[in-house]
Image: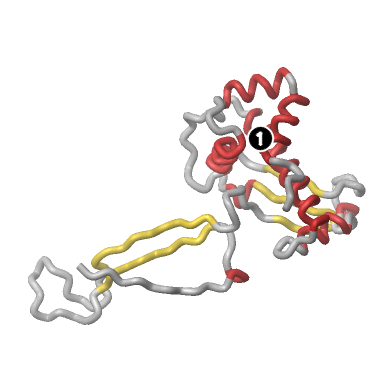
Amino acid sequence: MTTVEFDIRLSGADLGGLLLLDTAMVLARRRNEARPSSPRRAGSVLWNDREALRLQGDAPQFPMAIIDFARTSFPDGAAWHLQISGGLEHATMGALLLLVNERNTVTATAFQNAAKPRQIDRIVLSAVYADAARVMAEHALAHDDFTEESDFPDGSLGATLLSLFDQLFPGQQVADLRLRQRQSPSLFASDLQAAVKIFEVS
C-alpha cells in the first residue's frame, strides 16, 4: 500500500459556503486482457469518495444583498433585515436572505470590509450576527415540530437551525428553550446575547 500526499492551493476569493472534495480512482488505459468481471475500459471508476468542508467558520451561511430600503417595504431607517421564507424542509440557501440597507453607510461599509474589518466593522458585524441568530432561533421555536429529534435533510433550513442551537445552547433541550422564550422573551434575548458573545471582538 502506497500513501500519496497532494498539496493543492485554491484561491480564497473563489471559495465560499460548502466545499465538496471529490476523489476518484479511475482506470488509466483500456485492459484488453482483463477478466470479464473486471474493469477494462479506460476511465472506469474503481473507487470514489466525497468529503464536505464547511468554509468561513461554523456559522450558518446564507446569501446577502445590499439594497436601498427606500425602494422596499422595509423601514428606511433600518440597517438590515433577515428574511426567512419557506418551511424547515426547504434548502437553507433559498430560505434565508440577509438584506443590508445601503443608506446605512456604517453597516454597508462593515460588510464591504468583512474580509479585512476595522474595529468598528467588527462591532457592527457582531451586532448583525447576534440579531440574525435571534431571528433564526425565534423562527425555529415558533415551529412545534422543531425538536432535537427532528430528521431534517442535509442543507435544509431545519438542519441549519439545529446546528445553530447545538452551537449556541449545547446540551440544552429545545423544549426547555421554547418554554423559556415564550414565558420570558426578554430573558431569552439576553441568553442569546451571551451565547453569541456579542461585541467580544479582538
Task: From the viewer's side, name the closer residue of 74 and 162.
Answer: 162
Residue 171 x %, y %: 53, 29
Residue 141 vertical placement versus 152 (above, below): above
Task: Name the residue located 70 percent from the left edge and 64 percent from the top edge.
Answer: 115
Task: Name the residue located 77 percent from the left edge and 63 percent from the top edge.
Answer: 112
Name which residue type carries label 1.
Ala
Task: Name the residue located 24 percent from the left edge and 67 percent from the top edge.
Answer: 46
Task: In the displayed orientation, state which residue is furthest to the front.
Answer: 202
Q: Quadrant of residue 105?
A: bottom right
Q: Quadrant of the N terminus?
A: bottom left
Residue 90 x %, y %: 57, 44
Residue 110 x %, y %: 80, 58
Residue at numbered disc 1: 137
Q: Secondary structure at mark 1?
A: helix
Task: From the viewer's side, name the closer residue of 41 and 62.
Answer: 62
In the picture, measured across the screen, residue 42 lies left or right of residue 182, that is left
